[in-house]
Image (cartoon, helix red, strand yellow):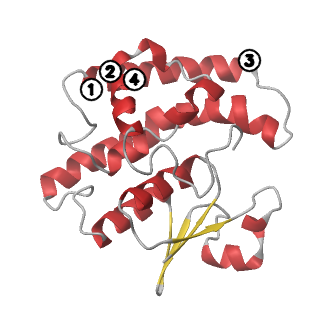
Amino acid sequence: MKLYYAETMNPRKVCALAKYLDLPVELVRVDLRKGEHRTPDFLAMNPNGKVPVLVDGDLVLWESTAIMVHLAVKAGSDLWPSDAPGQVEVLRWLCWDLTHFSRHGAALYFENLIKRYIGRGEPEPAAVEEATGFFRNSAAVLDAHLATRDFVAGGKLSVADFSVGVLLPWAREIRLPIEDFPNIVRWHERMMALPGWREPFPEPLPAVA
């Protein structure tokens, strides 16, 4: 298997999961600043021009959530539950994350980190204020949920944790206000103890990614 990645948020969750599962995945770095994600060869794999992309034999798979589920199933791991109710519960939190928590966190990720990295100038105060407010609303939901749970879905580690937590290692750089949500902090400390989560990439996580 080959996994095409860059040191950005969506590849992070897939690289972390693959490393945690100790899967035989060859990591192929895509240099976004050089436009390698826009070459004809890459667009033939993913017409969206985005990373990550997984090539597993004849299967070419894009979208980080789908890749995580595929890898978990391939490894025979219960990170993707085998029972339908468990799958629905994990799917619920994956959908919630993409619609709320990581969506608004990603706006802060872009404004406070990526913008400077790609030469788009300084953060837009109004956009930061709006995203911070929405993120706090979502974080309150997650914090209350985690008050009696160690993990996001089903009481045990799942692909939902790898998705929901993806931006927290950058919390300081992107100014995520997680310090006001002690249950999220506690949960992420647990995640940081997992193999692959703290250092998902072949090289240490850069300060600017």
Residue 137 place in picture, x, y as percent: 43, 19
Nearer mark to the viewer, of 4 and 1: 4
Task: Please tell me how crowded label 4 is: few (under 14), some (14-19), or many (20+) other residues with Cα within 10 Å.
Answer: some
Residue depth check, mark 3 versus mark 4: number of the one nearer the observer: 4
Q: CA distance from mark 3 to mark 1?
A: 30 Å
From mark 2 to mark 1, how far is it between C-alphas?
A: 6 Å
Dot placed on the residue nearer the N-terminal end, 2 or 1: 1
Q: Which element is circle 3 on? A: helix
Residue on which disc 1 sits: 146
Question: What whole-number distance in Å separates the C-alpha atoms at marks 3 and 4?
Answer: 26 Å
Q: Residue at x 31, y 72 (%)?
A: 74
- Secondary structure under badge 2? helix
186 relative to 24 in the view: left or right: left
- For label 4, the SS is helix
Q: Position of residue 60 (x, y in %)?
A: 51, 77
Taking depth in this image into account, of 83 and 21 the one nearest to the observer is: 21
Of the residues under marks 2 and 3, which one precedes in the sequence? 3
Q: Is residue 69 above or below residue 137?
A: below
Q: Residue 110: x, y in percent?
A: 68, 36
Residue to which mark 2 is pinned: 183
- Mark 3 or mark 4: name the one nearer the start of the chain: 3
